[in-house]
Amino acid sequence: MIKNINQLSKSKARCRKYRKKILEISQSVSALHIGGSFSSVEIIDCIYNRIKKNKDKFILSKGHAGILQYVVLNDLGIIKNKDLKNYQKKNGFLGVHPDYGTPGIMASTGSLGHGLAMAAGMALACKNKNRYFYILLSDGELQEGSVWESVLTISSLKLNNIIVVVDNNNLQTSSWTTDTHPTLYPIDKKFESFGWNAVKCNGHNSNDIFNKIKKKSPKKPLALIAKTIKGYPISFMKNVPEWHYRAPNKVEYFKAIKEIDNL
Amino acid sequence: MRNTFAEELYKHAVKNKKIYILVSDISPAGSMINFQKKYPNRFLNVGVSEQTMIGMCAGLSMEGMRPFAYTISTFALYRPFEMVRNDICYQNLPVTVVGMGAGTIYSTLGGTHLTQEDISIARSIPNMNIIAPCDPSELKEAINFCCTKSKFPIYLRIGKAGEKNFTKECKEKWTFGKIRKISSGKDVCFLTFGPIVKKAYDLKDNLKIQNISSEIYSCHTLKPFDYVGLKKIFKKFKLIVIIEDHSKIGGLNTIVKTCAYESQYMGKIVSYSLKDEFIHCYGSQEDLLGKHNINNKKIYRDIIKKIK
């Protein structure tokens, strides 16, 4: 119990640091995917800092949250400070979407609906080798037919070393997922009907994410439907579509930093 | 060719445990049944899921495996195009995408099953390489290359069944990236690739009666193209005839004529390619090619006219 509380407070501290770093970087670029990055912070933090072993791989299929992955990889010493400073810059190699070959990046993503099939190939190559593959999908990405091709194939091939986390912030570039695709819900039941185990969690609670993944059955692939809020925890960003791809101005920046400090 | 493909790949798979084949709802022909039975973990039918087939091959490759994606050419290249582009070519992975029954081979199935522009499309993707063997013998060499030497993406464009071997006794060896002389002559030069090479051999026989001697080249590697070899051909021949089971846009016709312009070739180039039109007719492959003016009687008459 005490261990869990400690882990939770450590995770919260890291997530504050990651969000502040993204805000800092936002001041040197014209725009970035801040809303969808902020909704994924606890998920990516938990996978990298609490769950993933060195031999495992993480694929950010919702590649537009690339800045978050870079910040976490920077914190882990995999991406250098000077390279992060050159994010989106002429002399840098870090663009908005992750590129294969960049330190710590396992696949080029950005066009939605690609990460899961590539992870399936990796998982097939490593079947029964006690290696796990973590893939973060956005909920809007579930509208891609290619995702469901792979969902069906993964369970049919019993690639049980696959763990999908869906960042369920319910908001896309400009519209609510519930408005455009009300029948997307319930997401967990869809995965279950495709032969997966599916559980829901609070996507902003590191312990909840951790515990649900740790309880994964070895007999099926796991889909963790993480309920999140786009732009979380910034008051003026939460659930506001325009923060899908925007950089805060100076006033907004200081306000956001203050809100994070007061968490 | 599909039987040769299966046999050869199986032979390599026995020796090399890194070889995987992912097929998309296609019945295993010949030795592919052996592959499937003996190595069920390395032969996978992913069903009608071409995007997943290509994505998985990329993933396998990123774990050090040597995967092949295999299905009818339209479903191997067109349907999962973005996966071919992003997952395989953008990441520059040694995956072989095998397009079987390419061009107009599936002549009774209609335009949805024909690939008249596949080379044009594949050629325009950076990092992509294209091999189109003319007979089962060349296919064996191509498979050996894909299994043992290739370090990059390949689109392997093959026929289907019943192709005759023309190059088995050929003096010149098959080399990736090199135009291959497969029959010697001096008056007219045929440039071609894929199973349609048969037309060039038939024409050669007919022209011989008129004392016209023909040289035939298999341009089996469409990308990277052997421009050095092509320029040597420009120096040697005043009449070049291109025969291809592909659109006039972006295939051998485009390659040769662009190079001819750049090298200020002064001879004649006549090409017999598919028109830039969808094909809505049925019948034999010959019937379809004939509708697009690719028939030997016409080619023969044209050559006689140009030479005399």
Image (spheres, coloured by chain):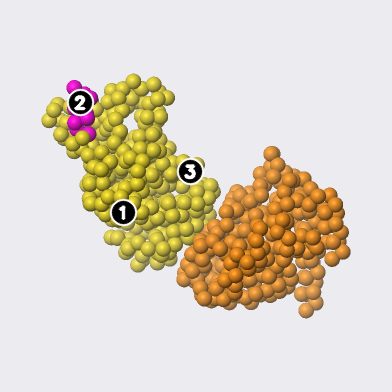
Chain colours: A orange, B yellow
Residue B119 % position (x, y): 39, 43
Q: Are marks 1 and 3 on the same chain?
A: yes
| Residue A68 visible in the snapshot | no
For the stretch drawn in magenta, the main secondary structure is helix
**Dot 2 amino acid type:** Lys
Label annotation for residue B110:
1
Name the residue rendered at 22%, 30% in the picture. Answer: B302
**Dot 1 amino acid type:** Gly
- Is residue B31 positioned above or below B304 on the image? below
Residue B70 % position (x, y): 38, 56
| Residue A64 visible in the snapshot | yes
Tag 2 residue: B305
B301 part of magenta stretch = yes
Earlier along the polypeptide chain: callout 1 or callout 2? Answer: 1
Name the residue rendered at 47%, 51% in the picture. Answer: B81
Closer to the camera, B208 or B74?
B74
Closer to the camera, B301 or A115?
B301
- Is residue A160 positioned above or below B135 on the image? below
Earlier along the polypeptide chain: callout 1 or callout 3? Answer: 1
A128 on left or right of A171: left
Question: Which stretch appears magenta?
Answer: B299-308
Tag 3 residue: B125
A181 on left or right of A38: left
Q: CA distance from mark 1 to mark 2?
A: 35 Å
Name the residue rendered at 61%, 49% in the picture. Answer: A99
Disc nearest the viewer among 1 and 3: 1
Earlier along the polypeptide chain: callout 2 or callout 3? Answer: 3
A128 part of magenta stretch = no
Number of other residues with Cα within 10 Å of mark 3, as a class: few under 14, some 14 to 19, many 20 or more: some
